[in-house]
Image (cartoon, grey):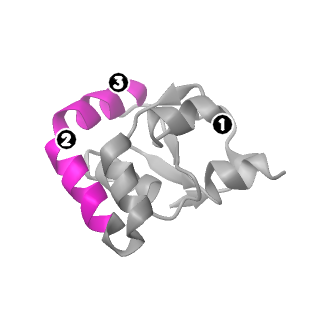
């Protein structure tokens, strides 16, 4: 389920962080946010509720997420790599959803912040 940055090759790289995080530390060309400002603020204030906030956001926004994932994977024909800040919650949850859709998806080990420290 996880892949190291040096093993990515030509696979599509997708950032699932908030639009603000994406603009501030732009490492990948594609952005499909899982949560947005207010949801992200809730996660930052009380991390133990993060799983539920993200899950609820994904359920409410499932049509947009599904359409974007299918489009970026060229309708399940190309593998994708998903990344969030540290690769602990948002990207693994999105990866599970992508795999449920039949998309070959992996999570970037260490997330975006792990790559920026290099």
Closest to the observer, 22 or 105: 22
Instruction: Give the percent coordinates (x, y) of residue 83.
Output: 54, 47
Instruction: Give the percent coordinates (x, y) of residue 21.
Output: 54, 39
46 above or below 110?
Answer: below
Q: CA distance from mark 3 to mark 1?
A: 24 Å
Instruction: Give the percent coordinates (x, y) of residue 51.
Output: 32, 66
Residue 49 visible? The answer is yes
Numbered circle sitting on residue 25: 1
Instruction: Name the residue at 20% across, 39% down.
Output: 61
Instruction: Name the residue at 31% across, 46% down.
Output: 38
CA neighbours of label 2 inside 10 A, class few (<14), some (14 to 19), many (20+): some
54 above or below 102?
Answer: below
Which residue was labeled with disc 3? 71
CA neighbours of label 3 inside 10 A, class few (<14), some (14 to 19), many (20+): few
**Residue range highlighted in magenta:** 51-73
Q: CA distance from mark 2 to mark 3?
A: 14 Å
SS label for mark 1: loop
Front position among marks 2 and 3: 2
94 above or below 16?
Answer: below
Lower position in the chain sequence, tag 2 or tag 1: 1
Q: CA distance from mark 2 to mark 1?
A: 25 Å
Q: What is the count of numbered marks?
A: 3
Lower position in the chain sequence, tag 2 or tag 3: 2
Which residue was labeled with disc 2? 62
Numbered circle sitting on residue 118: none
């Amino acid at each position: 389920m996880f892949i190291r940055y040096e093993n990515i090759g030509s696979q599509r790289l997708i950032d699932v962080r908030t639009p603000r995080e994406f603009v501030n530390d732009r490492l990948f060309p594609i952005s499909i946010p899982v949560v947005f400002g207010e949801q992200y603020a809730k996660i930052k204030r009380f991390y133990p509720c993060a799983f539920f906030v993200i899950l609820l956001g994904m359920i409410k926004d499932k049509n947009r997420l599904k359409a974007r994932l299918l489009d970026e994977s060229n309708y399940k024909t190309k593998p994708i790599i998903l990344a969030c800040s540290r690769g602990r919650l948002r990207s693994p949850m999105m990866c599970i959803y992508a795999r449920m859709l039949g998309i070959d998806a992996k999570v970037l080990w260490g997330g975006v912040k792990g790559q920026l420290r290099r």
